[in-house]
Amino acid sequence: MYKDFVDQHISLPQALFDIPLTCILGDCHTDNFGFISEEGSHGDTIIFTPNDFDDACIGHGVWDLFRFVTSLYLARHHASEVQMQSDDIKLRQKPLVSSAQVAEGARSFLLTYLQACEDSVNNKLTTQSALSSFDNEHILYKRWQKALQRKAGGAAFKTNSTLAKELDFDALPLAFKDDKQRFKRLEPHVYDQIVETFLPYVDDEILDVVERLSAGTGSHNLTRYYLLVGPKSAKMCEEEFQLCHIVEVKQQRMAAPLNYFTELSPINRLNAAHLTVNCQRKMQRRPDIVLDDVYWQNKHWLVRSRHHARVGCSPEDFMLGKRAALKNGFTQYAASCGHTLALAHMRGDRRSTLFQQAALEIIPRYVDELISAAQNYAIQVQADQELLQLLLRDS
């Protein structure tokens, strides 16, 4: 997308780029919003929020807005494809959000974003606000309940939490699962090096270490490790499993926008891992407790805890079904994303509301153009994807 901005294949009014720069997600789409436990795996509060900061940097807020609206149209296309290709008669019979409803949802996303900015300017909303509860008529209610059950001590902690999915709770001592598709056991000298290097950056003992295989959509070729962290006693005591958490150590790519926009801010000259840490700390209400940048083996590594409760939303969750298509659920989802994205953008400057004031002055004039440009870009992305599939089949 950012190359298309540079090459002017995407044309948006210049005024949208006059809004002050802030911390942005960089990869702002529907799959990167969901429920997490705040403070990494250390907090008990579950919130709905952006959950991926790997492409975060200092940039134009409109990039996030445009990318998210584009993703709404692509999500509908994906849900439609899933429905048509499914053998499940119940899935095939579910109502699908219409194209007109997607446009309505996109508008709701942008207007809710602007409402949050206005509330901030009027001291009705602070950067310490968050979406932490939903009534049972809201489309996100069931996802919220699922996340609550996965937090430490929750009903589904030992079956569906991030910890439960990665560890073997049926065997002692506690360790990562023997899953050759996901994990690779390390040579003793590498294991010892990792423990020695990263122990100062975690908040307890390192009980086990594995290399994580084939993780991440854009970083399959970058090395990452999982560290099981907790008290020594938890290794042999089932009652103390919830005191453990997983810390991810990973190499970090340059944030996607910075491949094409190199002069936005001196802050973006930080190494990729350090920039992610800085932006994530600013954009989160209560940042992960374990979140750091470590220099090891002539590389910078991002160190961060994984959330016990992490529940995302697939396109089928908010594009298919009576609640989504017939009971305003899709619009509820889009509005929730707009609100929480505004909070993340606001936190780029906690000293003033200059960003919010500029957004309120400029964006309302261009809401229709933003939605139209995103819809057209989504059509182009779909065409590009179909062409790529055709070329791969014929190669």
Image (spheres, rainbow, N blue to C red):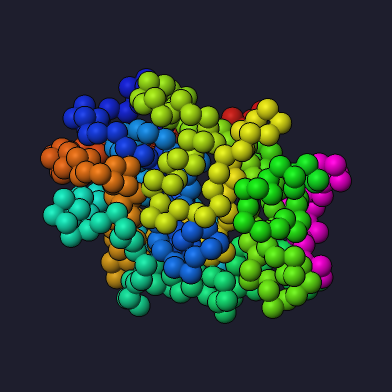
Q: Tell me which secondary structure the magenta stretch mostly adopts.
A: loop
Q: Quadrant of residue 126?
A: bottom left
Q: Is residue 97 visible?
A: yes
Q: Residue at x 20, y 44 (%)?
A: 353
Tell me where residue 221 appears, x and y as whole percent: 67, 35
Q: Nearer the viewer, residue 369 or 89?
A: 369
The single residue placed furthest to the right in the displayed view is 188
Tell me where residue 13 appears, x and y as whole percent: 21, 29
Whether 388 is drawn above or below 231: the answer is above
Assign the N terminus to one quadrant of the image.
top left
Q: Residue at x 50, y 54 (%)?
A: 288
Tell me where residue 132 appears, x and y as whole percent: 37, 67
172 with respect to 388 (left or right): right
Q: Is residue 97 magenta?
A: no
Whether 357 is drawn above or below 319: the answer is above
Q: Nearer the viewer, residue 150 or 374?
A: 150
Tell me where residue 192 appears, x and y as whole percent: 81, 45
Q: Residue at x 30, y 63 (%)?
A: 332
Q: Is residue 69 visible?
A: no
Residue stretch rendered in magenta on the structure:
172-190
Q: Quadrant of residue 375?
A: top left
